[in-house]
Image (cartoon, rainbow, N blue to C red):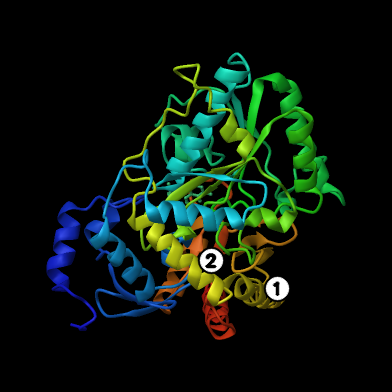
C-alpha cells in the first residue's frame, strides 16, 4: 500500500461500496469494479487509493480546481478564518464575504452586488427567483418567462432542470417548473437546417428573437445562457452571436443572465467568459472556480439596477426574501480570496489564454492526422474534440467508442471528460478543462494520450 493513502484502502473501498451513493453513476457495474477514490493531489497530478498516479485534464472531474491541487495557502486561509470565526448567517454578513465581494466586483464593471450561495445550482436558483420576483413586483406578474438554450446546463434542482437544455437529464423528474422556454443551440458544426452559412452566429441569435416574438416580449423576463456551453459539448458561440443577443435583450427589456459557473475565474483566458465577447450581463452566476474546490461557495452577481428593484420598504414583500444557511459563510469567501490572490499573482488567466492557444493548435494538428475528429472547439484551457464515424456525413461516433477512448486515456493515467451522456446523439465529444497552471508539457501528455486512445479504437 502506497503511503499516499491515509486509510487502509480495502476498508475504505468496502465502506464506499456499502454506503456511498455516488453522483451520476449507474451502480450496477460497480458491484464488481473498485471505485476510483482519489486520496491526494498536487498541481495537476492526483493519486488514487491504489497509489496510481493520474494527470488530471478535467480539474477535479467537473472543471473546478482552477488553481490546481495542494494549495496550502488556501487551506491555511480557510483554517485561520475558521478558528477566528467559523460561521455567521448571511443576513448580517461576514468579514471575508465583504472583502471578497469587493474584490470580485472590481473585476466586473457594470455589476455591483454579490448574493452568495454554496453551489452553482443554488446561484442559478437565486437568479431565477430574482427574475420571478421582479416580474411579480414590477410587471404585474406578466414578465415571468425565462429562456434557456438547447444543450446548456444550469444545475440539478427542479428549477435548474426546467431551465436545462439537456433534456435526457430531466426524464422521470417532472413535472417541471412552468414558464421556462427553450431557444435553439448555436453549434455551427451542427448548424440547423437553413441557418448554416457565413453569418450563422447572427442567424442563430435571431432564432432567439423568433422565440421571444412567439411568446410575446412582454412575457419574457430573462434569457439565461452559458457564455460557452460546457457539458453540452464546448460550444463556442460563433462570431456575431453575442452582439446580436445583447441587442435583442436590450430591445425587449429582457435581463441577460450569464451562467459563468464553469467559464468564470479564468477558465477561458479572461476572468469571465462573457468578456471574450464584449457583452454586458445584468446577472452573472459563478461557482466552481470561485474557490477551486477548497470550499463550497457560489455567487449570483447583479447590476445595481437589479438590486434597486428589491429595496421597497413600503411593501412587506419588497425585498429579496431568500436565504441560504451556508451561502457566503466564512470559509467559502476566505478560500475565494486566497484563490483569487493565486490567479492574480501567477497570471493564471494569461496562462490559460497562452497555454490554451497551444492546446487548440495541438488538437487541430491531431485532427489533421486523425479522421475520427470532426471538430475542434474551445477557448483557453477549455477545449473539446467532437468525434465522428464519418467526417463527410458527420455521423457521431458511437457512444461506446467514445467511452472506450476515455477509458483508454484513464488506463494511460490521463483523466479526460466526455459530453454528458444524457444528451442523446450528442454524446460524442471529449472534453478538456485542465487546471489553469497547465504548461505545454502537460498538454503534450494529454494530446498524446488521446492520440494513442483514438488510434487503438477498433
Ligand atoms: N451551471 C453550469 C454551466 C454547470 O456546468 C453546472 C455544473 O456542472 C452548474 C451550473 C451547477 O453547478 P453545481 O453542480 O455546483 O450545482
Left or right? Give the position of 342 relative to 18.
Answer: right
Residue behind label 2 places its C-beta within 8 angstroms of ligand 1: no
Q: Please say whether residue 458 is visible from this viewpoint.
A: no
Q: Residue furthest bottom?
A: 441
Residue 204: image location, x then y, percent: 77, 42
The residue labelled by disc 2 is 433
Q: Please say whether residue 429 is visible from this viewpoint.
A: yes
Residues at circles 2 and 1 in contact by the CB criterion of under 8 Å: no
Residue 456: image location, x then y, percent: 52, 76
Near-viewer residue (88 or 267): 88
Q: Residue at x 26, y 55 (%)?
A: 86
- Alpha carbons under labels 2 and 1: distance apart: 16 Å
Near-viewer residue (303 or 293): 303
Q: Quadrant of the N terminus?
A: bottom left
Residue behind label 1 places its C-beta within 8 angstroms of ligand 1: no
Place residue 330 in its image quadrant: bottom left
Say if 169 sits above or below 311 in the image: below
Left or right? Give the position of 371 relative to 292.
Answer: right
Q: Residue at x 43, y 24 (%)?
A: 175
Residue 367: image location, x then y, percent: 68, 72
Q: Which structural element holds mark 1?
A: helix
Say if 304 sits above or below 29 in the image: above
The residue labelled by disc 1 is 364
Q: Which structural element holds mark 2?
A: loop
Say if 277 sits above or below 253 in the image: below
Amino acid at each position: 500500500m502506497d503511503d499516499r493513502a491515509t486509510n487502509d484502502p480495502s476498508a475504505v473501498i468496502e465502506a464506499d461500496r456499502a454506503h456511498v451513493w455516488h453522483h451520476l453513476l449507474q451502480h450496477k457495474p460497480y458491484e464488481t469494479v473498485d471505485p476510483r477514490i482519489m486520496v491526494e493531489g498536487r498541481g495537476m497530478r492526483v493519486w488514487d487509493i491504489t497509489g496510481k498516479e493520474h494527470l488530471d485534464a478535467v480539474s477535479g472531474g467537473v472543471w473546478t480546481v482552477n488553481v490546481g491541487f495542494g494549495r496550502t495557502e488556501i487551506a491555511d486561509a480557510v483554517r485561520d478564518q475558521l478558528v477566528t470565526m467559523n460561521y455567521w448567517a448571511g443576513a448580517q454578513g461576514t468579514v471575508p464575504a465583504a472583502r471578497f465581494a469587493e474584490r470580485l466586483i472590481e473585476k466586473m464593471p457594470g455589476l455591483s452586488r454579490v448574493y452568495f450561495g454554496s453551489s452553482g445550482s443554488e446561484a442559478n436558483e437565486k437568479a431565477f427567483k430574482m427574475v420571478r420576483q421582479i416580474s411579480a413586483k414590477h410587471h404585474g406578474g406578466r414578465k415571468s418567462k425565462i429562456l434557456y438554450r438547447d444543450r446548456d446546463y444550469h444545475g440539478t434542482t427542479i428549477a435548474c432542470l426546467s431551465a436545462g437544455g439537456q433534456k435526457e437529464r430531466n426524464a422521470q423528474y417532472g413535472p417541471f417548473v412552468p414558464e421556462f422556454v427553450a431557444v435553439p443551440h448555436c453549434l455551427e458544426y451542427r448548424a440547423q437546417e437553413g441557418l448554416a452559412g457565413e453569418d450563422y452566429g447572427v442567424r442563430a441569435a435571431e432564432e432567439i428573437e423568433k422565440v421571444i416574438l412567439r411568446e410575446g416580449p412582454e412575457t419574457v423576463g430573462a434569457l439565461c445562457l452559458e457564455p460557452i456551453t460546457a457539458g453540452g459539448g464546448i460550444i463556442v458561440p460563433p462570431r456575431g452571436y453575442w452582439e446580436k443577443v445583447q441587442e435583442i435583450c436590450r430591445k425587449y427589456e429582457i435581463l441577460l443572465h450569464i451562467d459563468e459557473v464553469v467559464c468564470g475565474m479564468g477558465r477561458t483566458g479572461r476572468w469571465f467568459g462573457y468578456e471574450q465577447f464584449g457583452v454586458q450581463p445584468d446577472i452573472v452566476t459563478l461557482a466552481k472556480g470561485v474557490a477551486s474546490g477548497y470550499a463550497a461557495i457560489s455567487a449570483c452577481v447583479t447590476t445595481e439596477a437589479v438590486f434597486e428593484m428589491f429595496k421597497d420598504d413600503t411593501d412587506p414583500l419588497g425585498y429579496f426574501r431568500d436565504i441560504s444557511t451556508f451561502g457566503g459563510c466564512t470559509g467559502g469567501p476566505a478560500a475565494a480570496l486566497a484563490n483569487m490572490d493565486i490567479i492574480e499573482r501567477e497570471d493564471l488567466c494569461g496562462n490559460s489564454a497562452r497555454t490554451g492557444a497551444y492546446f487548440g493548435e495541438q488538437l487541430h494538428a491531431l485532427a489533421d492526422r486523425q479522421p475520427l475528429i470532426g471538430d475542434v472547439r474551445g477557448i483557453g484551457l477549455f477545449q473539446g474534440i467532437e468525434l465522428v464515424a464519418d467526417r463527410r456525413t458527420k455521423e457521431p461516433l458511437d457512444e461506446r467508442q467514445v467511452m472506450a477512448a476515455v477509458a483508454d486515456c484513464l488506463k494511460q493515467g490521463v483523466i479526460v471528460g466526455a459530453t454528458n451522456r444524457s444528451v442523446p446523439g450528442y454524446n460524442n465529444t471529449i472534453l478538456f478543462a485542465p487546471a489553469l497552471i497547465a504548461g505545454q508539457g502537460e498538454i503534450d501528455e494529454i494530446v498524446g494520450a488521446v492520440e494513442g486512445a483514438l488510434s487503438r479504437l477498433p
